[in-house]
Image (cartoon, rainbow, N blue to C red):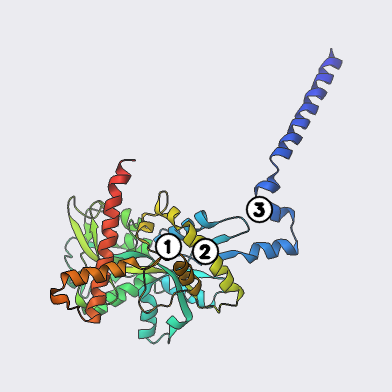
Amino acid sequence: MKRLVGMAIIVMTMAYGFAARAEEKEYDPAKVSESLKAIFQFGSVETKRTLNANTVTVMSGTIGGTYVQFGADLASVLDDGNKLRVLSIVGRGSVQSVADILFLQGVDLGIVRSDTLDYLEKKGFAKDIKKQFTYVTKLYNEEMYVIASKSIRSMKDLEGKTVSVDLPNGGTFITATNVFERLGIKPKFAYIEQRISMEKLKAGEIDAVICAGGKPYKSVSQFKDDRFHLVPVEYAKPLQGDYLPATLTAKDYPNLIAEGAQVDTIAVPAVLAAYNWAPNTERYRKLALFVDRFFTKFPAFQNPPFHPKWKEVSLSAPLPDWQRFPAAKQWLDAHKIEPVARSRFDDFLKQKTAGGKLPADSEREALFRQFQAWEAEQARAQLRPAQKSR
């Protein structure tokens, strides 16, 4: 009996071994994952070359912000084995990303706010800095949020008050500084990391917190305290050269806006930027590879589960005073994709302007920015019924 049991165990073990070998043959992990291949070939010069040849790094932003989510989306859609890998890096904000693109080894792209470079030049921190940058595409518009107690009814009420504007290496600091300077309002700035500043606001240690990011902006959505609300930011003339009008509703932030109400604010464009590499360099080649796949796969970003702000992105949208990355322009030209919004705007002006007389260039650019913001809002409104029916 013992002998029969022993033979049975041997047979079962052999059968299991054959099955395991068959399974290994069918599901060879080295055929499934390029990463495992790299491990199996540890120390190979060819592996090192392959992994580095087509990896493009994107400097995104801080945890909880829209930049980080966009970086993750880019990696999710565009990764294609060894043909292209998008490595999204958690960053420290728009100002730091400018420095990283210029000086940090291995950084190919970064998401920055369009007002950052102008600020650095106007303050004398940099000269002709835009010549060192190109842009792949304008991304989306980032709304400005001013969270304060309900006793603060307007921006003017923040005169002399303590206002947190995040850390000086971020885009929020730039935007807040610009806005207060142009409006002639002088608060007491506090440079506090955003999550900490929210807690200090609740504790009464500061009077307001400024945030800037694409809605829905996580830290603002999660802020819950009935004592506070969003303060309106008027689209005053001093702001119209660099910013866009925007509207926030109770649907966007029910914790801070009453049902049926809305709050006017401003927005600033986010830009996918790169260093101005010469066309015959290896870094230029990798960026051109990224552009081709990004632009080709772009429709995928317009649908869930990716960030809703992708619906605002128009690859061909012009960006005043910036130079387009040549490979991006060549791709758009080859596919005959033109900045349609600009032509529609020109037609709109001709029809609406009395006697066909067009406004001055400065007024025209401000009107176009408003037109862009209006079109983005209309696009979102058209998508809402479709999303509800799912």
- The amino acid type found where label 3 is placed reads Glu
Q: In this view, does 118 lie above or below 148?
A: below
Q: What element carries label 2?
A: helix
- Is residue 206 something that shows in the picture? no
Say the numbered circle drawn on residue 67.
Answer: 1
Question: Which one is earlier in the sequence, the residue at label 1 or at label 2?
Answer: 1
Seen at 31% across and 66% down, the residue is: 341
Which of pointers 2 and 3 indicates the residue nearer the eye? 2
Residue 27 pos. (x, y %)? 68, 40
Q: Is mark 1 on a helix, strand or loop?
A: helix
Seen at 27% across and 59% down, the residue is: 377
**Does 30 sit left or right of 225 as displayed?**
right
Residue 266 pos. (x, y %)? 26, 67
The residue identified by callout 2 is 292
- The amino acid type found where label 2 is placed reads Asp
- The answer to the question of whether label 2 and label 3 lie on touching residues, with beta carbons closer than 8 A, is no
140 or 184, nearer to the observer: 140
Which of pointers 1 and 3 indicates the residue nearer the eye? 3
Question: On the image, which quarter does residue 351 sit in?
Answer: bottom left
Image quarter in which the C terminus is found = top left
The residue identified by callout 3 is 34
How far apart are the alpha carbons under marks 1 and 2? 21 Å
In the displayed orientation, state which residue is furthest to the right.
3
For the image, the number of numbered tags is 3
Residue 202 pos. (x, y %)? 28, 59
Question: Which one is earlier in the sequence, the residue at label 1 or at label 3?
Answer: 3
